[in-house]
Image (cartoon, rainbow, N blue to C red):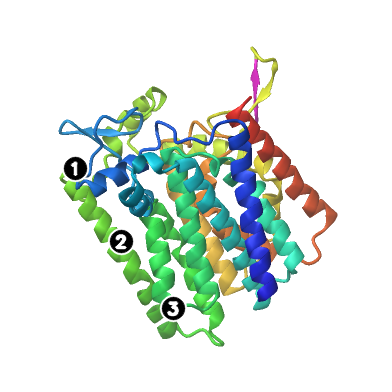
Amino acid sequence: MKQTYTLALLCFILALAAYLIPVALWERAYTPSAAYFNLLAEAFVQGRLYLIDPPTTIDLTLHNGQWYVPFPPLPALLMLPWVALFGVGSLNTVVFTAVLGAASVVLVFLILNELARRGWTQLSTSDNLWLTLLFGLGSVHWYMATLGEVWFVAQICTVTFVALSVYTAVRGGPAWLAGVALGLAVAARPNVALSFPLLLGIAAMHMKRIQLKGLLLWGAQAALPILLVAAALLAYNQARFGGPLDFGYEHAMVNPRLEADLAQYGQFDLHYVSRNVRAMLLAPPVWDAEARRLVPDGDGMSLLLTTPALAYLLWADKRTALARGAWTALGLLLIPLLLYYNTGWWQFGYRFSLDFMIPVMVLLATALRAPLSWLTRGLILAGVAVNLYGVLWWHIL
């Protein structure tokens, strides 16, 4: 275990360096105008739920003459102690996001290692480090962890707490603690509550013989904190907008390109499925006539281009409780993303994939065998190269 924690610390240091050094060199390591959660943390400290004179209003909601951050408040709550002690001006949201992103990398490595230690996957420590590389630098997680804007901060916070929940469950921790971690993730992006079947699958794996009563009891204990967080979010909506189901999204100052569809079809509709499938799986780069070169499509680009090793999901296990839980979670998580009015624009790759990357990492671990082939390692390194380009494209190209 000492070696595992040493490697975990090394993963944290290397990931943090990969996330912070480039933006520091390019002088991009500053809090952007659309960070919002730092200002919301300040508002909480001052007893407000709204922002006063925000520097920009994109994706904010104007209600009763006040500007509100429609997104659930977990990032602001995490920032609150620092802001209360040292002031909002001292908080750098890029550094905040990079630290949480590095923590997610560590948690993914620990999950993979624990799965292997229990014999639930067949990978060595070296193989698990390769998969950790896939997550940390070979996926859209890399560029997103270098940004401090509201959308990316929320997603990085979410994946950190989903990973913490899964690691708690894999380690055999208390059901309520796994539920607390997933509940905190829900307080950033409510749709990730659909990761819950993965927790149930893990709980079933811990049982020598699956007993429905025992599994239901475990599930109830894990679900209770999530339900409490959901109730708190409804109360938060009531306090802000006068209705528990009103998150403020429908009246947010969205990009003009999205306004017509949002007005005609609403936030979720079958109309959006083909567009989202294209952004997620099919979209290629586009030709920039002015620059005379191929560039990423800001509406989204295929996951098979940004993280080509995801093709191994075709060989993922489907027999064990772990695999069934992960596949069920992945399927459920895809539903709201496919029906959503926004592909994630403006972005590199498909940023909403972070919502389901933890179940995907578990499934990849079941699909592969030790030692990883040179083809597998080559695909992982290809993903790293593509996402390095993504970081460069976002910040300086």
User: Mark 2 = which residue?
Assistant: 229
Give above or below for 352 relative to 216: above
Residue 67 rendering spot, x and y as whole percentages: 24, 34
Mark 1 closeness class: few <14, some 14–19, many ≥20 residues within 10 Å: some
- Number of numbered discs: 3
Give residue 317's quadrant in the image. Answer: bottom right
Specify the amino acid type for callout 2: Val
Left or right of 134 on screen, residue 183 = left
Amino acid on which disc 3 is placed = Pro
Q: Position of residue 387 (x, y in %)?
A: 66, 40
Would you say the residues marked 3 and 1 are in contact, meaning their CB atoms lie under 8 Å apart?
no
| Disc 2 crowd, CA 10 A, few/some/many (<14, 14-19, 20+) | some
Q: Outermost residue toward the bottom?
A: 208
Magenta portion: prevailing SS class? strand
How crowded pointer 3 is (Cα within 10 Å; few <14, some 14-19, many 20+) is rated as few
Q: Which residue lies furthest to the right in this view?
A: 374
Q: Residue at x 50, y 45 (%)?
A: 95
SS at circle 2: helix
Which of the labelled discs sits on residue 174, or is there none? Answer: 3
Q: How far apart are marks 3 and 1 (CA)?
A: 36 Å
N-term-proximal mark, 2 vs 1: 2
The magenta segment is: 284-288
Instruction: Determine which residue is flagged by label 1.
Output: 241
Q: Distance between the residues labelled 2 and 1?
A: 18 Å
Q: Is residue 250 magenta?
A: no
Residue type of the residue flagged with mark 1 = Phe
- Kind of element beneath mark 3: loop
Task: Compare residues 192 and 143 and report the one nearer the observer.
Answer: 143
Residue at image point 39% right, 26% down: 255
Secondary structure, mark 1, is helix
Picture residue at 62% right of the left edge, 38% below the top:
302
Which quarter of the rendering shows the C terminus?
A: top right
